[in-house]
Amino acid sequence: MFKNILALSALAPLAFGAAAPAQAKALVAYYSAHGGYTAQVAKTVAQAVGADLFVIKPDPDYTDADLDYNDPQSRVSREHADPSSWEKIPLKQTEPDNFAEYDTVYLGYPIWWGLAAWPVYSFVAGNDFAGKTIIPFATSYSSPLGTSDVELEQKAKGVYWEEGMRFGQTPSESEVTEWAKSY
Ligand SMILES: Cc1cc2nc3c(=O)[nH]c(=O)nc-3n(C[C@H](O)[C@H](O)[C@H](O)COP(=O)(O)O)c2cc1C
């Protein structure tokens, strides 16, 4: 008898159609230029926390010549000289599919001149992050995270912004996994 009551009470929420608790959902949105270092870290983060992936794609994409920071006339150098252009870099898709469903966004980017790569400015400025938490991460050759995350945060609408993390170009899988799971 007692056993039956227990069994019934366990079934009750289902029988009366009670809503299941909302499942926290995470997205890893990232930009990676041709080296693919940030892409590799992003994939490891997504795997570690069971998140979906969204690739931030500039339109048009940067060619190798466009990314030549030693050439003052290259696309990336000209954009570097004009910070107002960063949040206007056209993207193939600005808002990820089903964006409203995500409450956490891991945001990955390479460091360019000590800052976040410009296409990420465009992604941040072009989306509404109301109610979401952003967890930034970057890869770089040697530069620290610096103010790259704080400067991006200033462009974001309605968001809780965690302190960012900088990785080298090829961090170990365990280093990335441990960090991603710490949230
Ligand atoms: C335009 C440009 C600027 C860069 N500026 C820096 C920099 O200031 N400091 C640094 O350590 N690395 C710099 N790098 C190197 C990248 O941050 C590094 O290789 C990064 O891991 C690349 O990631 P990705 O392969 O995902 O694009 C720069 C690379 C490019 C293309």
Image: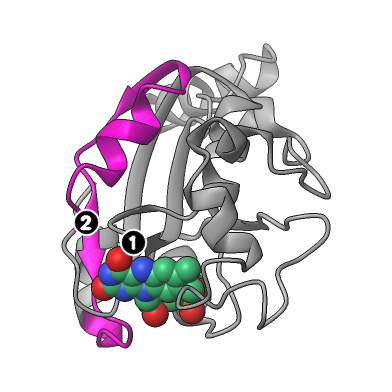
Proximity of marks 1 and 2: CB atoms separated by less than 8 Å: yes
- Report which quarter residue 94 is drawn in: top right
Instruction: Report, in whole angstroms, how far the alpha carbon at label 1 lies from the one at label 2.
Output: 6 Å
Residue toward you, 50 or 180: 180
The segment highlighted magenta reads 145-174
Q: Tell me: 23 left or right of 45.
A: right
Quadrant field for ligand 1: bottom left
Bin the neighbour count of mark 2 within 10 Å (Cα to Cα): few under 14, some 14-19, many 20 and up: some
Residue toward you, 136 or 142: 142
Q: Exactly how many numbered labels are in the figure?
A: 2
In the image, residue 54 above or below residue 14: below
Residue 12 x, y percent position in the rendering: 57, 18
State the residue position of label 1: 138
Residue drawn at the location 41% of the way across and 19% of the way down: 159
Q: Amino acid at mark 1?
A: Ala
Residue 41 seen from this side: no
Residue drawn at the location 17% of the way across and 50% of the way down: 146
- Report which quarter residue 67 is drawn in: bottom right
Bin the neighbour count of mark 1 within 10 Å (Cα to Cα): few under 14, some 14-19, many 20 and up: many
Q: Amino acid at mark 2?
A: Met
**Which type of secondary structure does the marked residue at label 1 adopt?**
strand
Residue 178 x, y percent position in the rendering: 20, 69
Residue 164 x, y percent position in the rendering: 23, 47
Residue drawn at the location 47% of the way across and 73% of the way down: 69
State the residue position of label 2: 165
